Image: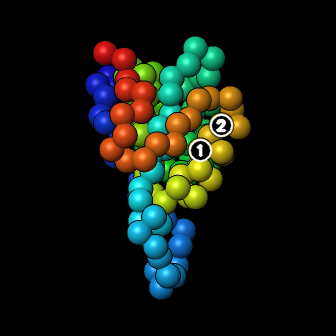
């Protein structure tokens, strides 16, 4: 029986290491998937595997957390990269938030 393990969000950054960066570029944003009553576990798993390149087990952990905790932070990185991942996940009609790391955002239900 799966008892739930918090999925450890992925660090994303598509910028080359030698690219000039401003302080704004170093600000991190989280990608948070929000639960709904429409998408199935399999749909969430499939889109997570596509958008995040995670294994089926990791995708299941994401779907479980979204379902049981109301949301799951799946990635964090520069705003451009976070928005790119969120746009892929939104393809299935699920709500995805991109918030600055440390902002309140919508918290999972209890």
The residue located at (52%, 55%) in the rendering is: 79
| Colour pattern | rainbow
- Check residue 90 in the rendering and tell me which mark sits there, or answer none: 2
Q: Measuring from the top left, give residue 23's x and y in whole percent.
A: 41, 69
Give the image location of residue 64, x and y in percent. Answer: 42, 27
* Closer-to-camera residue (104/43): 104
Please tell me whether mark 2 sits on a helix, a strand or a loop: helix
The relative height of residue 8 versus residue 95 in the rendered view (above or below) is: below
Residue shown at 49%/60% (left/top)? 78
Q: Residue 91, located in which quarter of the rendered image? A: top right
Work out which residue is located at the far front of the displayed protein and give it. 23
Q: Which residue is mark 1?
A: 86
Would you say the residues marked 1 and 2 are in contact, meaning their CB atoms lie under 8 Å apart?
Answer: yes
In-front residue for pair 30/74 = 30
Q: Is residue 15 above or below residue 70?
A: below
In this rendering, would 83 be left or right of 23?
right
Q: Nearer the viewer, residue 45 or 38?
A: 38
Helix, strand or loop at label 1? It is helix
**From where the camera sits, is residue 21 visible?**
yes
Q: Which residue is at a point 52% across and 37% down the rendered structure image?
A: 97
Number of labels in the image equals: 2
Q: In what quadrant of the picture does the C terminus appear? A: top left
Q: Position of residue 102 (x, y in %)?
A: 33, 44
Residue nearest the viewer, comparing 45 with 37: 37
Q: Residue at x 59, y 44 (%)?
A: 86
Residue 49 position in % (x across, y down): 56, 46
Specify the quadrant that holds the N terminus.
Answer: top left
Would you place residue 93 above or below residue 47 in this image? Answer: above
């Amino acid at each position: 029986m799966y008892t739930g393990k918090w999925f450890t969000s992925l660090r994303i950054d598509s910028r080359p290491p030698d690219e000039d960066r401003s302080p704004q570029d170093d600000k991190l944003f989280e990608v948070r998937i929000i639960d709904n009553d429409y998408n199935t576990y399999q749909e969430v798993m499939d889109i997570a595997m596509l958008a995040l390149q995670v294994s089926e087990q990791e995708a299941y952990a994401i779907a479980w957390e979204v379902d049981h905790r109301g949301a799951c932070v799946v990635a964090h990185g520069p705003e451009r990269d976070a928005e790119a991942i969120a746009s892929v996940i939104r393809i299935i009609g699920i709500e995805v938030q991109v918030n600055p790391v440390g902002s309140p955002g919508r918290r999972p239900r209890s």
